[in-house]
Image (spheres, rainbow, N blue to C red):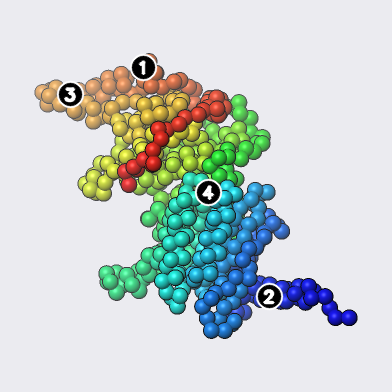
Amino acid sequence: MSEHPLRERLAELSKRKDEALHAGPERAVQRQHEKGKLLARERIEHLLDPGSFHELDMLSRSRAGETDDDRPYTDGVITGFGTIDGRKVCVFSQDFTVFGGALGETFAAKIHKIMDLALKIGAPMIGLNDGAGARIQEGVVSLDGYGGIFYRNVVASGVIPQISVVLGPCAGGAVYSPAMTDFIFMVRNSSHMFITGPDVVRSVTGEDVTLEELGGAGSHATKSGVATFVSDDEKSCLDDVKYLLGFLPSNNLEEPPHEVVDDDPERTCPELLDLIPASPNQPYDMKKVITAVVDEGDFFEYFPSWARNIVCGFARLDGHPVGIVGNQPMALAGVLDIDSSEKAARFVRTCDAFNIPLLTFVDVPGFLPGVDQEYGGIIRHGAKLLYAYCESTVPRIQVVVRKAYGGAYVVMDSKSIGSDLCLAWPSAELAVMGPQGAVEITNRRELAEAADPVARKAELVDEYTERFANPFIAAERGYIDDVIDPADTRRKVIAGFELLRSKREELPRRKHGNVPL
């Protein structure tokens, strides 16, 4: 009796799927491992919950190519869905062992399909990038494929979290998809992103630069503000992606995931009393304030090595995720400048898009003065942060820790721009400008005529400090809702967010606002 035709088909299916699982030549697989890099499927296995991955389009292959050998299954990208901590996600993973991970028509179509699916079901989209850019032999078809990815990135922006993990080369047009996603992860010494490589730079501008200097994780984490998070190896990078997802909702219609924590919401933070130095000109570490207040001291910092004069990141308060922004007196005295305004503005808008409440710690002496800053457009860039806060409808709490001077105080989520609750420590100094500058401007003539200008200036500075460098005038006027004992910060902030959980605010209907880009 002959075998059932379906069994023959199953044998054929098994053979084809086996070919798909080994699409890249052994030599390429070996090279990938020698570089300390995981294979496309190994990355998915590490990222997703065990056994949860369901692959789609496994048997897709290119229409270009003369023979079947020229048309391997998967076409160089693995796509599908699975779970992380039990929550559904969609993922694509570029396979450097097939065509060097270069994008062609079929490759792009697979990514388009999984991106469309992620948007329809409201699940985070995670892209694991490790490819050489457009497939040259497919010409303009590849470029059209990129366009389709970029368009979908924009349509999904603010609807589902989009995470890009760069685990190899990412060059030319390929970098624009990660650039439009919410977060970019890179790995030291093996990830590279650039529009034009070192050879082109050398031939066009004469500048001699290495691959690592031009587009490595270190450069993008410290200089360009492209890499949000950097890890030392691929596995810890993928672990960080999982960690980040724990703070984010699956889409813009959901609340961020609540976790049960052991940290008492009524806990006081007496250590904060000794943190503020006696002299207002001495720095302290704002991250210590943040870790003292949040659940179990757990703070996941966003762009930790870029624009260090402002600290941004995710934490939990009574198990609920919050986004935290704080000026950092340890770097440039905590002033706002071009980079810090842009970093915080993007963070604020990301939190607002995904229903994550905002907590802002203020210790800002002003905007950074200087020709470079003015010519570089500090007015425009500072306005981005102002715009981001004004536009945010999530619950917002401001805590003025020390300095809150001039326009920079207003920009740091003040009452006047829509903050829901504004608290201040007794060390807070709310004024138009710092005592030294104010006295020089308002008492110029008196100082010029004084017998001892230095002594008189010191007296006037003391008077000004006593009158203005405190939170009480602002509290009298209602610009500050409560002046609190620093030890009570955690208790007060948790109570505030609990109150604000039912906040509902709608902006006027419009196509979209016009961010001062």
| Residue 151: percent from left, percent from top | 44, 56
Residue 16 is labelled as 2
Instruction: Name above or below for residue 22 compared with residue 361.
Output: below
- Give whichever of discs 1 and 3 has the lower sequence position: 3
Q: Amino acid at mark 2?
A: Arg
Identity of the residue furthest to the top in this view: 476
Badge 1 density bin: few <14, some 14–19, many ≥20, Cα 10 Å: few
Q: CA distance from mark 2 to mark 3?
A: 85 Å
Q: Nearer the viewer, mark 2 or mark 3?
A: 2
Please tell me whether mark 3 sits on a helix, a strand or a loop: loop
* Of the pair 6 and 135, the residue shown nearer to us: 6
- Give whichever of discs 4 and 3 has the lower sequence position: 4
Please tell me whether mark 4 sits on a helix, a strand or a loop: loop
Please tell me whether mark 2 sits on a helix, a strand or a loop: helix
Q: Is 1 placed left or right of 478 in the picture?
A: right
- Give whichever of discs 2 and 3 has the lower sequence position: 2
Q: Amino acid at mark 4?
A: Pro
